Amino acid sequence: MRTFFECLPCFINQALGSLRNCNATDEQIKDVMHSVLAELSGMDFNVPPPVTAQKIYRIISKTPGLGNPYASKKQQYNRFARELLAGIQKRTATEQDVFSSKVILAIAANIIDFGKNSELSESDVLRSFEKAVGVSIDSVALRNLRQELQEAESVLFLCDNAGEIVFDRFLIEEMPCHKVISAVRGAPVINDATLEDAQAVGLTEMVKVIQNGSDAPGTILKDCSPEFNTVFNQADVIISKGQGNFETLSDITNKRIFFLFQVKCPVIARNSGYPVGTFVLKDNQSAEECTIQTKMEMKNE
Amino acid sequence: MRTFFECLPCFINQALGSLRNCNATDEQIKDVMHSVLAELSGMDFNVPPPVTAQKIYRIISKTPGLGNPYASKKQQYNRFARELLAGIQKRTATEQDVFSSKVILAIAANIIDFGKNSELSESDVLRSFEKAVGVSIDSVALRNLRQELQEAESVLFLCDNAGEIVFDRFLIEEMPCHKVISAVRGAPVINDATLEDAQAVGLTEMVKVIQNGSDAPGTILKDCSPEFNTVFNQADVIISKGQGNFETLSDITNKRIFFLFQVKCPVIARNSGYPVGTFVLKDNQSAEECTIQTKMEMKNE
């Protein structure tokens, strides 16, 4: 998808949020924001938002003393998500449809996104998991996903964020693990999951984990490594977590992709057709991707 | 006051809001936003926000076909405010303290600010007037204002926005009109009141109205005409309406200024010490400027 004009204030807020998170000085904030604004003054609106976000985060991370603004948040939320999982793991095992429950939990965990909310708190995450209890996802897409997972010889699971990755691992448990390759970002950006996070939450012990070779908060194929592109092209099914991966892969039609994410902003709401707050499981090769709940909400608008 | 980093997304939103309001094409929006971002990339954070806002609105108004984005909104809200006034005029006349009531109504009308909310609707205005019924303003500042108006030989009343100016006129009725000069912007910017608005609402029939010679959404003295500066310097008391005038005049200590405005953003809240939504009457030479209501709210934070 392309970048909308409404993404502009969001880019600015994301940059400011990152700078606040790593306790940048006023002088550093001023200098970085001047550079970010200069970068935006020449930006291309025909590319997906993560292309521009990548440039912004590079400006921040290259500033001496700032580095990886969300490093401690990533550790905090990997830990918090594991505690959260410990509390609901048993209950999930007794659910009638364990796979479906884990898909919903993996979407609930997608709230752990400091790009969209630099002031995210643990209570925001708890609220998302409370909401997950009553949510329903598109049954047709779910059926297709199950079927594809059975029939596929290779599955590529694109992770999104630290913390969230704990629930990705929990979902991947239900998949034929020998066929699954999981991918993380090639370098830190916002709180996106990297190899370090995959190791920290034990994902590397369960499936093969590869780095995508890119520091974009999404999957920009031409920015990813040739190795990653090979895996991507060879995968029979791709499971794509989060808004950033949706923004960068939503136009791809020659691969079967299942998008799992929460709609966190009006731009994605407009582009995806789901209201803000929707838990989305979207099959890119099915027209019937709306949840029953969502369709009802949209009717009322 | 200086510009805060949090003003940056607001500048962007203001520009986008203006462009949407005059039905700019996507190509126009893209070009204007590129120029606005280039302007912001070199901006000075040590000056008040209206200095930068002035530059942004000049970029918009100089774009062929865009001109004066809020021209029709200004007419609409001058009309709407007059209708609103017609409905409450009689009730106000029976109030125990007519002057105080009119001060509060003039602050209620300060909600008509398309800079802070480009999607403002008539129901937002009605809500502000409903809120005005129960509001209390700083009694010390009010007493001082009354006294200064009696003792002063010259009063300068700085108007803020179209629509709002109807209630400024209603308040000025209670002042010794022969001593009052009212000032409006020198050229259109956002929905700020100009001479045309003063004429439209009959303010020019009541007091002398001067233009300040500037197209900034505030009162930047060095950008104002020598004539305006003379009036400003000679005035014994200045009554300043709105956030933009507060932002540009809050550091002036050698003049007696009474600021009347609604706090409409977190930056002004932090800078003025009043929570968002507060109806402020602030005497720049009194330490006791908080409303009782506000003090209680602040205590609870």
Image (cartoon, coloured by chain):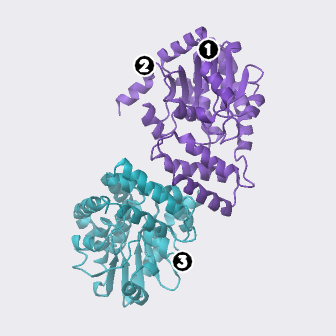
Chain colours: A cyan, B purple
- Does residue B202 lie above or below B269 as drawn? above
B61 on left or right of A234 = right
Instruction: Classify the position of the C terminus of chain A by image quarter.
Output: bottom right
Q: Which amino acid type corresponds to the residue marked 1 in the rendered image? A: Val
Of labels 1 and 2, earlier in sequence is 1
Return the x and y of residue B266 as percentages of the image width and height.
46, 40
Q: Are marks 3 and 2 in contact (CB under 8 Å)?
A: no
Give the residue at mark 2: B288
Q: Quadrant of residue B189?
A: top right
Q: Is residue B111 positioned above or below B18 on the image? A: above
Position in image of residue A16 (x %, y %): 41, 53
Q: Position of residue B260 (x, y in %)?
A: 55, 26
Relative image position of residue B171 (x, y in whole percent): 65, 20
Q: Which residue is mark 3?
A: A251
Gap between marks 3 and 1 measured at Cα:
63 Å
Q: Chain of mark 2?
A: B
Q: CA distance from mark 3 to mark 2?
A: 60 Å
Alpha-carbon distance for marks 1 and 2?
A: 22 Å
**In the rendered view, does B28 fall on the left or right side of A58?**
right
Q: Which mark is residue A225?
A: none
**Amino acid on which disc 2 is placed:** Glu
Of B266 and B286, nearer the camera is: B286
Residue labelled with disc 1: B98
Q: Quadrant of the N terminus of chain A?
A: bottom right
